């Protein structure tokens, strides 16, 4: 087996929260008198860092307004997050990779405490050696955490596969010396992901064939 470890993104990759996030942002815009915000709108502009994504939605975004919006978004998100589900076949794919003898970890821009809570909710603790999130709600980047994780794992270039759903996942993979597979049903549109040189999959089960 080529890969000695699989690193997973969480939001949009294992956890199906695309429509939920778009709905929250639409609610926040309508509250302030702006037009509603569709899933296609979301897919066309979502990016990292999230501050940049917000700048594409809100004109003249100040630090204070960004903090206000970030706190409001997380407040909405945390309220009903557990009403969302894992992506199709997530449990099955995680189990099959475990049967292959490949250890797995999560590397997410989600806040650590919330990430730990939701992983426990879906009873996935035993699937992962490491669950790594951020220490804040601003989802700027997970690159530094990715570097720390790969150092902890002690793996060489090409021995790790990172599975995500955004170009930021590819950026992180490139920086830490991991190969990358991107899921096309997550937080960035297929036509955005196609601009990369990453392997694309439409379903999580496609990853098993790739492995």
Image: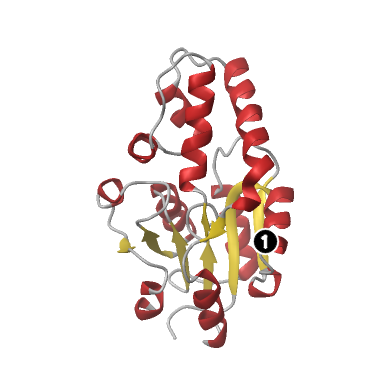
Residue 61: where, in percent of width, then height? Answer: 50, 16
Q: Is residue 207 left or right of residue 191?
A: right
**Residue that badge 1 annotates:** 119
Residue 205: where, in percent of width, then height? Answer: 40, 74
Position of the C terminus by quadrant: bottom left
Q: Would you identify the image quadrant in which residue 37 lies? A: top left
The residue located at (40%, 63%) in the rendering is 180
Residue 112: where, in percent of width, then height? Answer: 70, 50
Q: Is residue 15 left or right of residue 114?
A: left
Asked whether 183 or 104 is in front, the reply is 183
Question: Relative to residue 155, is residue 63 depicted above or below?
Answer: above
Question: Relative to residue 189, is residue 61 depicted above or below?
Answer: above
Position of the N terminus by quadrant: bottom left
Asked whether 29 or 94 is in front, the reply is 29
Question: Relative to residue 74, is residue 153 depicted above or below?
Answer: below
Question: Relative to residue 120, is residue 69 depicted above or below?
Answer: above
The residue located at (52%, 27%) in the rendering is 27
Q: Is residue 49 visible?
A: no
Residue 147: where, in percent of width, then height? Answer: 57, 55
The residue located at (43%, 71%) in the rendering is 158
The residue located at (62%, 69%) in the rendering is 153
């Amino acid at each position: 087996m080529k890969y000695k470890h699989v690193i997973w993104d969480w939001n949009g990759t294992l956890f199906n929260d695309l429509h939920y996030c778009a709905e929250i942002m639409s609610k926040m815009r309508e509250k302030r008198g702006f037009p509603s915000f569709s899933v296609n709108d979301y897919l066309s502009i979502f990016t990292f860092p999230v501050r940049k994504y917000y700048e594409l939605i809100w004109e003249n975004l100040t630090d204070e307004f960004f903090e206000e919006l970030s706190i409001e978004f997380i407040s909405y998100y945390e309220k009903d997050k557990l009403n969302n589900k894992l992506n199709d076949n997530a449990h099955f794919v995680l189990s099959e990779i475990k049967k292959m003898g490949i250890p797995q970890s999560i590397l997410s821009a989600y806040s650590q405490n919330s990430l730990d809570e939701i992983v426990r909710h879906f009873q996935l603790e035993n699937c992962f050696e490491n669950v790594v999130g951020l220490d804040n709600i601003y989802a700027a980047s997970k690159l530094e955490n990715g570097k720390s994780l790969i150092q902890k794992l002690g793996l060489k270039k090409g021995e790790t596969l990172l599975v995500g759903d955004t170009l930021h996942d590819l950026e992180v993979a490139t920086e830490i010396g991991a190969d990358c597979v991107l899921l096309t049903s997550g937080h960035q549109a297929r036509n955005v992901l196609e601009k990369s040189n990453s392997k694309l999959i439409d379903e999580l089960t496609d990853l098993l064939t790739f492995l």
